[in-house]
Image (cartoon, helix red, strand yellow):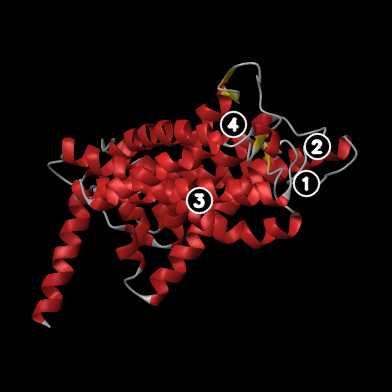
Amino acid sequence: MSKKFWLGLLLIVLSYLQWLMPKSWFMHHHFVAGCVLTFFVTMFFVGVILLCGGISDKFKGAEMFGTARRSRKELVLFILAAGLSGIVLEVFAQWLGKLWIYPFFLPWIYWIVLFPGFVFYWVTIVKSYMAAKAVIDDAWPQKRSRATEPYYVFEPALYTVFGIGGIFALAYAVAHQLAAYQLHGGFTFDVIASVPFAPPFHYMIIGFFAVWGIAEWGLYLRKSPSALRSMLHGYWAPTFAILLSAAALAFFMETQNVMHHHWIYTHWPWPDSNVLGVPTTVFLTWPLHYVIFMIIPGVIAPIWARVFWAEQSTMLTKSAAKTSVSAKS
């Protein structure tokens, strides 16, 4: 493995030094304590990015930052896709769903770090996925490009149904969430403290699947690879990569939080069923936000649909072709 991998592993190990800090110091959610926890969590994220980058390099996976730096437009779309994906998650799960809070954040800090923080978090999530996908692609090579095969005859209708159905489902979920708030005294925006009421959990799940369906339709209209298209055509590496990377990162990220509670989960169903104090339903839904973090960018910038959902061999082929054209020029 490369130096990048070992440096990432070292940073991840060092990030757990927060466990040695006195728990009593974090009982009161003050600004300095929040800064200390943010430092360690940032160290953990950087470690994951480097470690997963080392794995991707070892197994010849797609290079995320190289793709983003191809042009100024690609870089802008990269940042926009990353931030927007995170904000979609935050709107449904935190603002409307009230599923977690950030007790150490002051309101002005929250608004300053909201967009750049989710760009950083998105890179961490996607890097872990791309590392897992690179390993699976290497171990399970495809003889042909399944993810970009011609559509089956039923697929155009299927994606159209998912897209239009997703629009109605999204409207249904948001309307019922807002109606539920209205019945309980109105909506309260609070990202720091827990509120007494949150709408039923299933409306959030409906909303996320609705966004997924709309994005699948958008990718079909672009004739781009997608999560569903890959599965329908027998290319299962993205699905297995999501499950593998989500399980691994969920465990390590939640153990980062288990001691001092940089973030706190609220209003999750079946809270008595938990692992290390984290509701089991949190772990079960981790793969879903991986899907959202990768399906939305593909709609915004088609190159990401191919990076996330197509075989690595197709990326190498396109890259080689571009290099050849450049050489001839």
User: Alpha carbon of mark 4 to alpha carbon of mark 1: how far?
Assistant: 23 Å
Check disc 3 and report its element: helix, strand or loop: helix
Q: Which is more toward the observer, 286 or 325?
A: 286
Q: Circle 1 is placed at which residue position?
A: 190
Q: How many marks?
A: 4
**How far separated are the C-alphas under marks 4 and 3?**
16 Å
Q: For residue 155, what is the image quadrant?
A: top left
**Crowd rating for badge 3 (residues with CA inside 10 Å; few <14, some 14–19, many 20+):** some
Sequence-first tag of 4 and 1: 1
Q: Which residue is mark 2?
A: 195
Q: Residue at x 11, y 72 (%)?
A: 324
Q: Are marks 1 and 2 in contact (CB under 8 Å)?
A: yes
Q: What number is the disc on residue 259?
A: 4
Q: Quadrant of the N terminus?
A: top left
- Amino acid type, label 2: Val
Percent position (x, y) of residue 254? Answer: 52, 33
Q: Earlier in the sequence, mark 1 or mark 2?
A: 1
Disc 1/disc 2 C-alpha distance (Å): 7 Å
Residue at the image position 49 percent from the left and 57 percent from the top: 82
Question: Separation of disc 2 and disc 3 at Cα?
Answer: 28 Å
Q: Are marks 4 and 3 in contact (CB under 8 Å)?
A: no
Left or right: 275 as drawn, with respect to 195: left
